[in-house]
Image (tube, coloured by chain):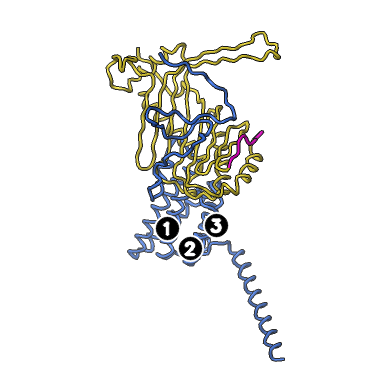
Amino acid sequence: MPDTNTIEFPKPALEPPPASGTGGYRLSGTQGGAPARIARHAVRGSTALAPIEIDKLYPADKNYVSDLIAALSVLADAIGLLEKARAAARNKDAFTADRYWQRFQSLLPGLFTRRKIGDGYGAVINALHFACVNQHGAPVSLEQLTTVWRVIKELRNAPVITFEQALKYVQELEDCHLQVYPTTISELIQETEDDESIRGDDRSDERSLEARL
Amino acid sequence: MPVHLSVADFKAANAVCELRYENAYLIYDRTGLVCREARGFYTNCNVVTASPNQTIFQADEGAFALELSQCRFSTNRPDPSLEKFAGHCKTFFDSVTIHLDVRVFTRVGFRITFRKDYKDLDEAKAALNSLKLVNLRPEERFGAAPEPHEIFFRWEGNQVGAMLRLKAESGKIDITLPPELEAEKSEIHKSFNGLILDVDYYTVAPVERSQLDASAWILRSARTIRKNLDTIFGN
């Protein structure tokens, strides 16, 4: 005859740990309502080095579209297009490479609409948008294609990156001569840098004058 | 007589989401920050117990636990769509991971308990056994009973895993009211019988912080759970 359970109302005090059986067998798992006082379970998978595959963490589902899952799908398409563009660029087929690059560019607005995913994600997508705009139709090089492809792959594997992490990717894009900021901002930054260098020159002139005096 | 079951017949009775990580020693410095933020986010949030390795706080939304190597949010009243639950989890987990500087989760788990009420325990047992999940002839085992009233399954790969527990359960509530209430009835007794589905869906491989959006993961996992339960029920 089964035991009659007494249902307890939720209470703030600690409850005993989850059911354990004969021989101290414990059902390791997500713990119930109240935390266990002795809460040191064997952690499965802690010895594994590789992080989880993003498609296992968020399996694709046509009937359920969250920002993140939708972005993962579009990012997968983007990676595919960039791979084809790289293959064409390696074969010196600039026309085909540019065609795939333009198709990649058309995916950016869709990715931009999902920027709620996080600040880091938004920063990378914005940088890619301006990189495309500032090309003014000029074809991208194989090196640039490879950098964008790598950044997109990284972003797909870890879409919830912090803003600081995103800045590293933006720097990588800049390092391969993609202009990742709006033109006006670039000009302003340039002007500021010029002003600082002029001020620096003035100061060094003053110092040399003082030294001569 | 076979009983047709669907997850839609069950009501979510309890939901827990838990993150596990390597010992986060910043807990000794920054628990107060997490508590203060929680008080800003949640309604009537108060610390219930606090010790160096474990702090528990309770709010109208649910219970929060912050420990050296894990943190969790649980509620006994999950909203049907779980969107609010997922949002509460995300807010709490974001606060914990930022303040405790947790970068990798060794395990992320989502556990949900569904319940369907039956007239009596026998009916609940009949519903469980009509699923024919165990390939055993109905004869008395261990001198106890011919058919089990609780069944466990665990599926585990190298990326994710799941545990499913089905139990025909009988419960009873006995409350004696204080005489100061001057209520017509001084005692309340209620018994109920039901079938419990307890599902724990979790990651096996480590999850980086930059991979996890707790809200999106919980909602996606809830769909995975419902879909798989319906498959198990033969729908």
Badge 3: residue crowd in 10 Å (few <14, some 14–19, many ≥20): few
Single out the mark in the foreground, 2 or 3: 3
Mark 1 residue type: Arg
- Of labels 2 and 1, earlier in sequence is 1
Give the residues drawn in magenta, as a range: B44-51
Which chain letter matches label 2?
A
Q: Which residue is mark 3?
A: A164
What is the three-letter code of the residue carrying label 2?
Glu
The colour applied to the residues of chain A in this rendering is blue
Q: Which residue is mark 2?
A: A172
For label 1, the residue is: A150
Q: Is residue A123 magenta?
A: no
| Discs 3, 1 touching: Cβ within 8 Å | no
Callout 3 amino acid? Glu
Observer-side mark, 3 or 1, equals: 3
Could you confirm whether marks 2 and 1 are on the same chain? yes
